[in-house]
Image: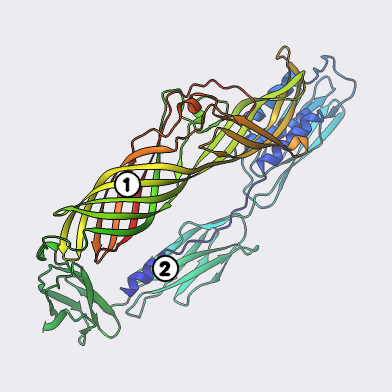
Amino acid sequence: MRRKVMLMAFLALGMLCGQISAQSCKELFRKAENLRKGEKYDAAIATYRQVQNCSDKTYGKDCDYAIKWINENRPVRKAAQPTFFGLSTKAITLPYQGGEWAVFVYGGSSWKYSVEGDWCKVRKNGNQLIVSSIAENESTQPRKARIRVQSGNKSEVVDIVNEGAPERLRSSVSNLTFPSKGESTQVEIYANTDWKVVETPEWVKTEKETTKLRFACEANPQSRERMSVVKIESPSNTTIVIQVLQGAGDEKLAFSKNELLFGPNGGDEYVKVYTDAAGWKFGDFPHWIQVTRVADDMVKIHCAPNDPINEMREGSVNVTTGLQTLGINISQEAKPVSYLIPMPNIGGRKLSFGLSAGVVMPSISTASDGTFNGSAVNYALANSQENASYRTNTGFSINAFADIHLWRNLYLQAGLGISHYTYKNEFEADGVERSFPQTAYVYLKGRTQNHYNEDYSLTMFEVPVLASYRFPITKRSHVQLNLGPVVSYGMNAKLKLKGNTDSETLKTYKVATDEVFKNDYSSVHYEGSGEFDLFGKSVDYLEKHEELGGIDVNRSQTLDDSPLSRLNAGLRAGAAFEIHGIGFGVEYTYMLTNMANKKFWDGDRWKIFSQQAPATMMGYKERHHYLGVKVSYTFRY
């Protein structure tokens, strides 16, 4: 058993590996924006294309718009050839992943080019040379190339550098298992740098080849498994680990049955012992098991009847050879409750009082007859992008109750309690077109990235009135089934909102005609936050614009009605087990009434943007159901 645990723990060890992050796509995008604003259009286009090659595709559409703008708006060069001959740049640096760069050739009635460097790909496009790499640079060292452009007796050169890749070191496997007799095998090592073996166990020999590592494992002279690690290291101390495991030697120990299951009345089982050790022994077993050696290769295991305590019991019998120890796992079923004599009633007082506490696990059910199913916050989209998806957290409940005996095993349980829980919704939408007023004559409009978190909390009084039927087990223990209505009154309901809207690609439009006033891109960084009483009819919140120096702008909104209704009703069903007044129960509360107030949800809701959105979310319904697990004590005896 211990060897199984050791083996599982050993195989669970993960291989350590390093990962080097690439250049930030956001920084590249800002660099391209600065180049465009400085009218360095060729370099800007090249940088936008590097952003498009990034793994992060957030700025892909913005790059397309920017490149299209440059091609449509930059000055058109005259058809006549200038009298000089030159290039737009004489040095290019490409990232190791590759990329593309345009070099403009100025002047010269005709020109040609040649390339020094087999990794560099160059093609002619009008008066441009498009430079790119054939494949990613896998070496850690940068590679260089040169383009020579010739026009008559004049020539110019462009020096190109492809940056070196980050160091990589990994193996084709992270674990190796060898048989007890020993074995040889090889493992692929994927690296773009030099490496060496820095640690091996004595019983494993390694031999380094160009891209492989050969392992030779000696035979295991021991009668138990052995394990160790082989460590490989690069010059920069990047390390990978390969775990090695070898099976035990020749001595055998096994059983015809490794797991035994007895019924509640016990019984006998015979188990054969397979081993080449002459002096094996058994021992270490619980009092309700008896073991007898009935042959050289067999034991008899006797299990006594289980006591009527309704509990399953487990144990084991260990067999040892001196070098190895192996166990036979034994379990016995519990004597069922039906073996016990039921009592006619549960006893105790006719009227008892009690207390309970537990956890609640809510679920938020919403529906709408409109085109989308949103939250209390109006994000001015009025489409499915506003659909809310609530995630709930575990809450708690505290209750006091009266337990009233009505007739035979029928009871009435009525009480007063408090329940509290939280839930959240996240709104995230990229590429949303929004407008932002600037002056009385112009405004900004363009695509934005939006991310807002909505954190909700709800506390309410509850009055359950439940019919409870009891199934006696003993005079002071029973199982109860409960069913009945529950009325709830909301004490406190809060929504905390925080988030931001960002864009780097806004254009300036005229208010009077909605025509483009300026083609240059502008940016906006907006942050909104506030706290909303879901039982109230007004809300105050803060806006902060980075472009205005981060000044807080206080805003407020008066609503047609509160989002939620305080008074609601539901149905509760549950079951519990009680012994000596201590109870353990589970219950489910299903809300029957609609918590949502029609005037609020059919109206504007909480608008955090100064924009109008069609009120299409009609017929909204919201209900909170929850599962509760509780512990109680009844002053019954």
Tell me, yes or no, if residue 104 can be seen here: yes
> Which numbered disc covers residue 10?
2
Residue located farthest toward the right when viewing the structure as drawn? 83
Tell me, yes or no, if residue 295 can be seen here: no
Using the image as rendered, state which of residue 488 and residue 320 is in the foreground: 488
Q: Quadrant of the C terminus?
A: bottom left
Mark 2: few/some/many CA within 10 Å (<14, 14-19, 20+): some
Q: Quadrant of residue 290?
A: bottom left
Horizontal and vertical percent for residue 359?
A: 39, 54
Question: Which circle's residue, 2 or 1, is located before the other in the chain?
Answer: 2
- Amino acid carrying label 1: it is Pro
Residue located farthest toward the top when viewing the structure as drawn? 513
14 on left or right of 470: right
- Amino acid carrying label 2: it is Phe
Q: Which type of secondary structure does the marked residue at label 1 adopt?
A: strand
Q: CA distance from mark 2 to mark 1?
A: 53 Å
> Above or below — where is 119 with respect to 521?
below
Q: Residue under label 1, please give it.
A: 464
Horizontal and vertical percent for residue 411?
A: 21, 52
239 on left or right of 410: right
Residue at the location (21% across, 87% down)? 279
Residue at the location (74% across, 29% down)? 522
Horizontal and vertical percent for residue 364?
A: 41, 39
Mark 1: few/some/many CA within 10 Å (<14, 14-19, 20+): many
206 on left or right of 93: left
Q: Which type of secondary structure does the marked residue at label 2 adopt?
A: helix
490 on left or right of 271: right
For the residues carrying marks 2 and 1, which lies nearer the camera in this image?
1
